[in-house]
Amino acid sequence: MSIRSYNKDHLKEHASVSLADSIRLDAPKSDDPLVFWTHHEKHPCEVNLHPLAEGQEKGNKGRFIAFSGRPELIIQLAPAIEEALLYAATTTVYGYLNTLRDWWRLLDAVEAAAAKTGQDMARVEDVRLLTNMHVEFAHRIGMLNRTFSRFRSLVDITSLALGSRQTYWESPEDPDTPKHIPPLAQRNALRFEVRRICRNVLERWAQSDRLSHIDKKPTEPQEANLWLNVRHMHNIQRKTGKVLPTSLELCDGVDRGTLWGRGIQIGTSRESVFPGHRDAEAVWHQCLLNTGWNSSTLTSLDVTKRFLFNHYKDDHEDPHRRFVL
């Protein structure tokens, strides 16, 4: 009897994927404990916690709710905040700052309610002063689960670093949002229409590319019109040296009415070599339907890099094969 050792990591072997080098960014340095820069690959940004230390009376939006400053509390939380946001995207940074502002307002509201009833309550400038009263108030006002959980995580990290215990706060449940799912027939009709529009776009691109290599005007009227526009666009491209000439350059010194009489339209000429916004939206929505990704994932993909790899367990010739993103 022997003990066998199995290699279960076949992903790198079959997918020809190597580990990426760690990204090193030269983010600005700060000696201020309440200011730091994220190290995000594409969009590093500054995180300034001073408004939470000093308080804020006015905001950029009309329905802004003021809050008082808590300098000692934010200095306590700052290391945990920096750790959480060091490689975060800008949207995540904004989300955490909104979370902190919401909790600052909650602390103000709890202390104001205690003062109104004549109860003696210490101002919270230390995470160890947070109690179940604050948790109960968060539940009572209907705080979102994400807002509650983010702050609890920061408090737990800070409390443990100070030698105290972590909290065991119970997160509130988000209210059920009514969702309406259209009937299958309507969903299929939408899918078929998007697919039809997308196919028309791809066929038109292929047609424009084919006509760009033809010197003689086609006999079919629709192809003849598109051929004129493709030819006009290529002539202006060679003349200006630009991939996408401006509308004025496409007019080539004559008015649009004269071009129209020759069978040339500025929009058609431009879209013969460069997708219009409707074409791009058609393909984009078709990608959403085919992949099942959400819009944020699809929009953030860097198409200059390889981001899809064949799944190591699937045959490359299988039309239903899977991919690794």
Image: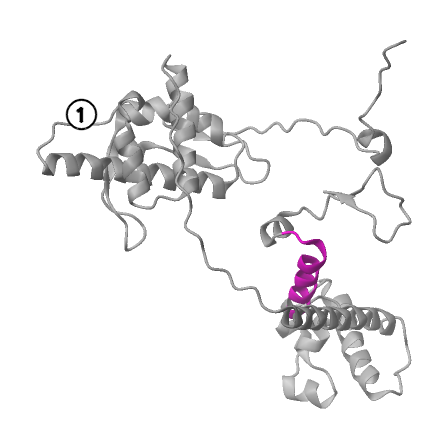
Q: Nearer the viewer, residue 310 or 222?
A: 310
If the image is split into quadrants, where does the N terminus sit? top right
Q: Position of residue 98 (x, y in %)?
A: 37, 42
- Helix, strand or loop for disc 1: loop
Q: Nearer the viewer, residue 182 or 130?
A: 182
Amino acid marked by disc 1: Ala
Res 198 seen here: yes
Q: Nearer the viewer, residue 20 or 290?
A: 290
Res 255 seen here: no
Residue name at image x 72 percent, y 83 percent: 264
If the image is split into quadrants, where does the C terminus sit? top right
The residue carrying pointer 1 sits among few (fewer than 14), some (14 to 19) or many (20 or more) residues within 10 Å by Cα, namely few
216 vs 325, left or right, is right
68 vs 26, left or right, is left
In the displayed structure, would residue 265 be above or below residue 181? below
- Boundaries of the magenta span: 278-293
Residue name at image x 50 percent, y 60 percent: 179
Q: Quadrant of residue 50 in the image?
A: top left
In the displayed structure, would residue 117 be above or below residue 179? above
In the displayed structure, would residue 5 be above or below residue 217? above
Magenta region, main secondary structure: helix
41 vs 263, left or right, is left
Q: Quadrant of residue 111 in the image?
A: top left
Report the residue that reaches farthest toward the bottom.
261
Report the residue that reaches farthest toward the left.
118
Taking the magenta stretch, the answer to whether it contains residue 292 is yes
Q: Position of residue 41 (x, y in %)?
A: 59, 36
Residue under label 1 = 122
